[in-house]
């Protein structure tokens, strides 16, 4: 039970830390909403198949909000290392795998909370989201968040300063988002861009969410779901090994 309790305590600490940082909560909503209202609204005249561009963009915005908050979870590791708290956790009589799982679940929970709030705004742009679609979307968001949070923790395991983490985080976030098909239909993209996008794990997260939310997808749902699930599972394994190398 000590391992389970350790996971719970670390998870709770991450959630409380996020909840108390009101500025972080507010700022994390600004970019996705601006993209949806201004970028999506500006191209509302564009039709992607049978849906308008703003509706097409919405699942991508949900995924973008998940990525932004998920990968920034790694900052908590650097913060704890900077103030010596990480050393106290690492010498505690619990496995480092449990510490990693607690942090990953904490980051995943905060990302999921934000994603749910943005997902709940679907009615504002005329997307009728049924209960079963909402629940399936939540499950997908959890899987996506878990993979991206693990990626952020992997980066934090090898980076010593906030500045370096910020540079690497931005270097990863923008390609992940912009190559995922969040802002453009993959079917209309040039062949070279399709190939690059198919190498982006977030592409499959966006496509699976788009399939469930608006019923439009350029990749079969089964393939998207299996790929994003395998990515998250692999990220957790690699993250756990990286965390066990912490000094």
Image (cartoon, rainbow, N blue to C red):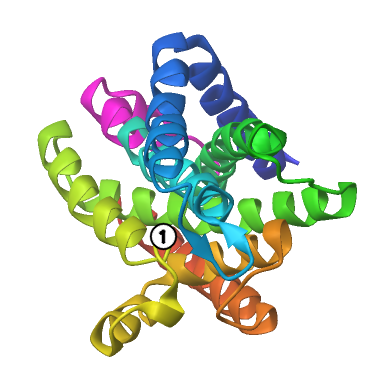
- Left or right of 85? Residue 164 is left
Q: Please give the name of the residue rendered at 61% of the width and 60% of the height, measured from the top-left corner.
A: 51
Q: Residue furthest front?
A: 45
Q: Which residue occupies the foreground of this view, 217 or 4?
A: 217
Please provide percent x and percent y for residue 22.
46, 10
* Residue 63 visible (yes or no): yes
Question: In the picture, which quadrant includes the N terminus?
Answer: top right
Q: Is residue 219 above or below residue 104?
A: below
- Identify the image quadrant of residue 56: bottom right
Within 10 Å of disc 1 (Cα), the crowding (few <14, some 14-19, many 20+) is: many
Q: Which residue occupies the foreground of this view, 233 or 237?
A: 233
Q: Is residue 86 magenta?
A: yes
Please provide percent x and percent y for residue 168.
17, 50
- Left or right of 45? Residue 158 is left
Q: Please give the name of the residue rendered at 52% of the width and 47% of the height, measured from the top-left corner.
A: 54
* Residue 91 visible (yes or no): no
- Identify the image quadrant of residue 225: bottom right
Q: Please give the name of the residue rendered at 60% of the width and 71% of the height, measured from the top-left corner.
A: 229
Please provide percent x and percent y for residue 161.
14, 35
Please provide percent x and percent y for residue 189.
34, 78
- Identify the image quadrant of residue 113: top right
The secondary structure that dominates the magenta segment is helix
Q: Is residue 214 magenta?
A: no
Q: Is residue 1 above or below residue 220?
A: above
User: Helix or strand or loop: what does disc 1 sit on?
Assistant: helix
- Left or right of 106? Residue 123 is right
User: Which residue is labeled 1 in the image?
Assistant: 239
| Span of residues in magenta | 77-95
Q: Residue furthest right?
A: 131
């Amino acid at each position: 039970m000590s391992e389970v309790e350790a996971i719970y305590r670390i998870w709770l600490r991450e959630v409380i830390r996020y909840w108390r940082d009101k500025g972080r909560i507010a700022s994390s909503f600004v970019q996705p909403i601006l993209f949806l209202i201004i970028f999506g609204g500006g191209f509302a005249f564009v039709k992607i198949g049978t849906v308008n561009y703003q509706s097409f963009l919405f699942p991508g915005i949900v995924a973008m909000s998940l990525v932004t908050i998920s990968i920034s979870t790694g900052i908590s590791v650097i913060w704890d290392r900077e103030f010596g708290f990480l050393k106290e956790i690492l010498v505690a009589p619990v496995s480092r795998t449990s510490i990693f799982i607690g942090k990953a679940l904490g980051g995943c929970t905060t990302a999921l909370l934000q994603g749910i709030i943005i997902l709940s705004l679907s009615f504002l742009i005329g997307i009728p989201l049924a209960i079963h679609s909402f629940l399936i979307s939540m499950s997908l968001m959890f899987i996506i968040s878990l993979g991206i949070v693990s990626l952020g923790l992997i980066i934090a395991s090898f980076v010593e300063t906030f500045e370096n983490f910020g540079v690497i985080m931005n270097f990863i976030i923008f390609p992940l988002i912009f190559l995922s098909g969040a802002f453009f239909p993959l079917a209309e993209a040039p062949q070279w861009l399709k190939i690059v996008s198919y190498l982006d794990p977030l592409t499959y997260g966006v496509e699976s969410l788009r399939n469930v939310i608006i019923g439009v997808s350029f990749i079969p749902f089964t393939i998207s779901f299996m790929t994003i699930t395998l990515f998250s599972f692999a990220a957790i394994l690699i993250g756990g090994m990286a965390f066990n190398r912490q000094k």
